[in-house]
Image (spheres, helix red, strand yellow):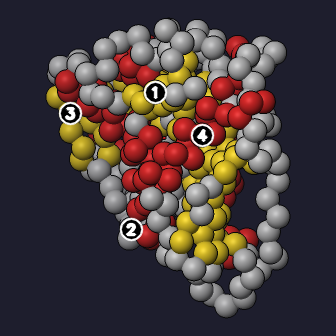
Amino acid sequence: MKNEQNIEQNKQPIEWSKLGFEYTKTDYRFSATWEDGKWSDGDLLTSEYITLHEGSPSLHYAQQCFEGLKAQTAADGRILLFRPELNAERMRNTSLRLSMPVVPTELFLHGVHEAVRANQSWVPPYGSGASLYIRPLLIGVGSNMGLRPAKQYEFRVMVCPVGPYYKSGGLSVISLAVSDFDRAAPHGTGDVKAGANYPGGFYATSKAKELGANEALYLDAAEHRYIEEAGSANVVISLAGNKLITPKSDAILPSITRRSLMDIARHELGMQTEERPIDLRKEIGTFEEVGACGTAAVLSPVGKIWFDNEWHKFYANGEKVGPVMQSLYDTLCQIQKGERADRFGWTQQVKV
Ligand SMILES: Cc1ncc(COP(=O)(O)O)c(C=O)c1O
């Protein structure tokens, strides 16, 4: 139900700096539905619940996908989104792969802007270290039994204020453990953001945690040789000679953060960049600094990786943030918060 007059302008009474990466109910979510080949205009809703038919293909066959992006308050008070059109494009690719209707870019962006605008009191203030996480999702709904795509869909955008993804918070060093499990098969769905890619990783992550790591690191499923990505983040690696490399693979999620960091490295920091297969066993001894990157993780320096029954440590014995990851992180965050000239045109203002 839209109620623009009542949309709260003042900030919520929250201790923003204490937020973790958890769900908080906010006032509004955007929802649009698809049926008979057409999208509805969409509207703001107040209830956080969705009533689903028990035959919904999202429940049985995981015909579901999602996105993740953030809104942040800039120093001058503007609310900024970071490259939301790339999330629209990625959801489009995912939808086509999962035989779901494409959410047109205008509808995707309208939903994101509306959800943020309506919940502006929940957008953490500048300097709080928190941000508004935006979670668009597309689900197949309606009665269905046979193994076929849904006839009806809901596109929903929910938002909630969040703090750092890793419990240690801020820019602190994390660790990864190479998993015996595979995340995605070649020519499977690893390169799209299908919800079904994730639950298999819960167990892999719990095994990584038993080893004292924050997350699992996956190798390619065919040879268990090349680095793919972490459970919820891509990987970037700095090498001697001012180089930044990142794995080339058709089975990893094309991270918007990674793409941006590679551009920052090349164009702002003057580094040589390369996307190529990275043979972990052969190359791990040459890694200077490693980072896990994504909307949630931002850029988390990886101090050590568990592989072949031992910890392999990087910069400062895995105990400190290295200069390359620090510069990449600082530059990215400055652009996202409007503290640095946005020479790439990456930020988009939400009109409130
Ligand atoms: C598996 C996986 N890889 C990488 C990423 C990072 O992608 P992005 O930078 O677009 O958030 C995410 C998070 O969205 C993810 O879930």
Q: Residue at x 58, y 9 (%)?
A: 127
**Which kind of residue does numbered mark 1 sit on?**
Gln
Tell me the mark number nearer the camera, choosing from 1 and 2: 1
Any mark on residue 349, and which? 1
Q: Which structural element holds mark 1?
A: strand
Residues at badges 1 and 4 in contact (C-beta under 8 Å)? Answer: no
Separation of marks 1 and 3 at Cα, in angstroms = 30 Å
**Mark 1 or mark 2, earlier in chain:** 2
293 versus 156 height, above or below: above
**Mark 3 or mark 2, earlier in chain:** 2
Total numbered circles: 4
Dividing the picture into quarters, in which one does residue 129 lie?
top right
Residues at badges 4 and 3 in contact (C-beta under 8 Å)? Answer: no
Q: Label 4, on which residue?
A: 114
Q: Label 2, on which residue?
A: 186
Separation of marks 4 and 3 at Cα, in angstroms = 37 Å
- Packing grade of label 4 (10 A; few <14, some 14-19, many >=20) is many
**Which kind of residue does numbered mark 2 sit on?**
Pro
Answer yes or no: is residue 284 visible: no
**Mark 4 or mark 3, earlier in chain:** 4
Task: Report whether 205 appears left or right of 240.
Answer: right
Separation of marks 1 and 4 at Cα, in angstroms = 12 Å
**Mark 1 or mark 3, earlier in chain:** 3
Place of residue 284 in the rendered image (x, y in percent of width and height, measured from the top left):
35, 36
Separation of marks 1 and 2 at Cα, in angstroms = 38 Å
**Which kind of residue does numbered mark 3 sit on?**
Thr
Q: Label 3, on which residue?
A: 273
Q: Residue at x 67, y 34 (%)?
A: 118
**Mark 1 or mark 4, earlier in chain:** 4
Separation of marks 3 and 2 at Cα, in angstroms = 24 Å
Answer yes or no: is residue 226 visible: yes
Pick whichever, 33 or 143, lies toward us: 33
